[in-house]
Image (spheres, rainbow, N blue to C red):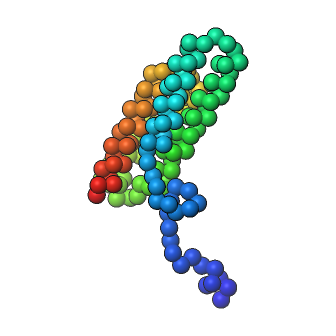
Amino acid sequence: MLRHLLAPTVEVSAHCDLPCGVYDPAQARIEAESIKAVIAKVADNDDPDFRTRAILIKEQRSELVKHHLWVLWTDYFKPPHFEKYPQLHTLVNEATKLAGASGTKGELDAAKADELLAKIDEIAEIFWETKKA
């Protein structure tokens, strides 16, 4: 009986613990734009303290990109989306790797930041198509 009383009666899904239903790839894009800007600032500054702080921020922003993309991938996109857009798994995988240790998190390469932004834009295009449906 207790088990029946504690069983969920409504099933919900969201990107956070409160089912607000707000998803937007812009969150990942903003962080990726910040990464690109930090890379440029580091290139123009020789102060070791500034560079250390900037690199730490870049690494944190890279983690946030991965987080925002994973939320879309695991919570927003559903099987019908993956069926209609079979490239979606690969896009998210490539984007999160570009934000990872071999990408913007581990390197100061503006080209990697540009690649990351391009992948996020591809994911965003699919995302907004799904919102129209």
- Residue at image point 63% right, 79% down: 6
Q: Is residue 39 above or below residue 34?
A: above
Camera-side residue: 20 or 67?
Answer: 20
Rendered image quadrant of residue 18: bottom right
- Residue at image point 54% right, 21% down: 39
Total numbered labels placed on residues in the image: 0
- Left or right: 38, with 126 as reference point: right
Residue 92, percent from left and from top: 44, 42
- Left or right: 88, with 11 as reference point: left
Quadrant in which the C terminus appears:
bottom left
Q: Is residue 64 visible to the viewer in this orientation of the structure?
A: yes
- Residue at image point 43% right, 44% down: 25
Rendered image quadrant of residue 79: bottom left
Camera-side residue: 58 or 99?
Answer: 58
- Residue at image point 42% right, 32% down: 117
Q: Is residue 97 visible to the viewer in this orientation of the structure?
A: no
Residue 56, percent from left and from top: 65, 28
Q: Is residue 88 above or below residue 45?
A: below
Q: Residue furthest bottom?
A: 1
Residue 23, percent from left and from top: 45, 52
Camera-side residue: 30 or 121?
Answer: 30
